[in-house]
Image (tube, grey):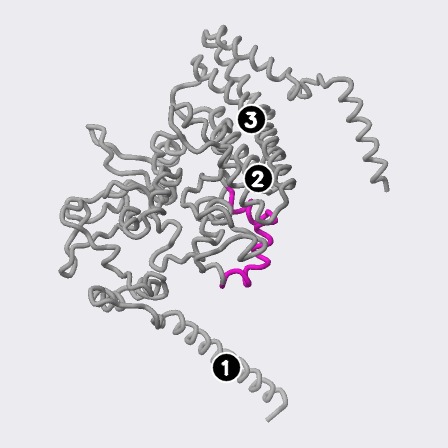
Amino acid sequence: MSLDQKQKIIIALAFFFLAALTIVAWVEGGRRRVVKAPDAVVTSENKDCVDCHRVKSPGIVGQWEISTHAKSGIGCLQCHQAEKGDVDAYQHEGRLIATVVSPKDCAQCHEREAAEFQASHHASAGQILGSLDNVLAEVVEGFVEFDAQGNKVKPSPAAVSGCLQCHGAEIKVLDNGKLDPATWPNTGIGRLNPDGSRGSCSACHLRHNFSRAQARAPENCGRCHLGPDHPQKEIYQESKHGIAFEANRARFEPLMEAKEWIPGKDFEQGPTCSVCHMGATKNLPVTHDVGERISWTLRPPVSEKIDAAAIKAGKRVKSWQQRRKDMQEVCSSCHATEWVKNWYVQFDNAVNLYNEKFGKPATELFQMARKEGLLTEIQFDEELEFTYFYLWHHEGRRARHGAAMMGPDYTQWHGFYEVAERFYMEFVPQLREVLAEGRRHGKAAAAARIEARLNQILDSDMHKWFLGRMSPAERAARKKAAEEFKKRYAQ
């Protein structure tokens, strides 16, 4: 046998043994994943369910067996058992059960958590009908079929598979007791359930193991909070918080399943989303109301304090000052008092800059054009509507969320830079085109009123640079700064 042949045989054997080891490792890993947890308690009332579903849907049983529920003897019927008269109840293997497990069901054991969640903005996320987002999903992007009486016959797939998977669908029960496939499956955070409750606990506590560690992971929130209009997950990953968590993830993850997960006590850096917005501190309890510690609302065209809308409606709610105080309590677990206060000064300044320079002027001018009849009543049939939507709904949100979560690149290049480019290079020219079109169609007076206001805004301190009217003092200061910069970095 030649040397070349021997080498080929040795290489072949090496590949064979490597493949064999890989298969063994995969099989052993698979076995470890599906082995029944030794401390899972299968009660007599749940035994038939577990035995049957271990064959029909072993993944579900495997998830449940490693859960805290299983260790406590909480099984299938404790969550899925229905009562006579429940709209979604049906007979299954001699038992009256319901497919949908709602916050009302969870409240049997988790009463405080369910009550906090029902009071949260998350629980209202399903109320998006009539919003601009919904118009996009049902009309612009998608298509909804109606009958002659105006009843919705077939929903828009864009909404069903997109918006509603995060916001939540209204779960409908068909005449045969089955769930309408246009509305189920759905674990949107603001789901409208057959029993009248709102929301879905399994939106965050993924069934059927309902892991605390999983709910605390940033990816869990990133299921909905990511993308061009609300990139909180991406901003978190850019932030020092996200970097610190990822760097210490292997050390932290084994501890995250514990009931207590307190910053400054159980870990020293790298908080996740749930730590700041929901988690306990030395002085604050866990909350399932994610807005409990938010002082600004960063979602609308113009930001306002989180309690402003409720106050206008005559409701008594937790004040934005108290919410901020609670969030600062979380920050103080790892940061000095002066650091926290100074950071909030920077955050407030960024939000106010967006509001005063772009949000308020663009919104005022856009609403004037609509009110004066220079825009049609149809949503998104004109270029200016898309431009304005991008300005606040995408770029404006990114700027504000970036500032809120310490993501400088999202604040600047994905935020304020794109807001400014959109405002000056698209919104203003397109508005002028709308005004010119209005004059051509007999609306000269309305166009004149809007143009006067536009000119007044552009001639204000924040915008007059655009008209070449920067003050001599500022012009001189900028020229001096540019010369010093060139000297400093001269080759």
Label 2 Cα crowd, 10 Å radius (few <14 / some 14-19 / many 20+): many
Q: Is residue 176 above or below residue 130?
A: below
Q: Which SS class for mark 2?
A: helix
> Identity of the amino acid at label 1?
Phe
Pick the front one: 61 or 348:
348
Ranked by sequence position, the earlier of labels 2 and 1 is 1
Label 1 Cα crowd, 10 Å radius (few <14 / some 14-19 / many 20+): few
- The alpha-carbon separation of the residues under discs 3 and 1 comes to 65 Å
Main secondary structure along the magenta-highlighted residues: helix
Q: Does residue 237 show up magenta in the picture?
A: yes
Residue indicated by mark 1: 16
| Residue that appears at 60% across and 86% down | 7
- Contact between marks 3 and 1 (CB within 8 A): the answer is no
Q: Nearer the viewer, mark 3 or mark 1?
A: 3
Residue indicated by mark 3: 355
Label 3 Cα crowd, 10 Å radius (few <14 / some 14-19 / many 20+): many
Q: Which x, y percent locates residue 166?
A: 39, 44
Q: Which x, y percent locates residue 79?
A: 26, 55
Q: Does residue 24 show up magenta in the picture?
A: no
Q: Which x, y percent locates residue 125?
A: 37, 38
| Residue that appears at 24% across and 32% down | 146
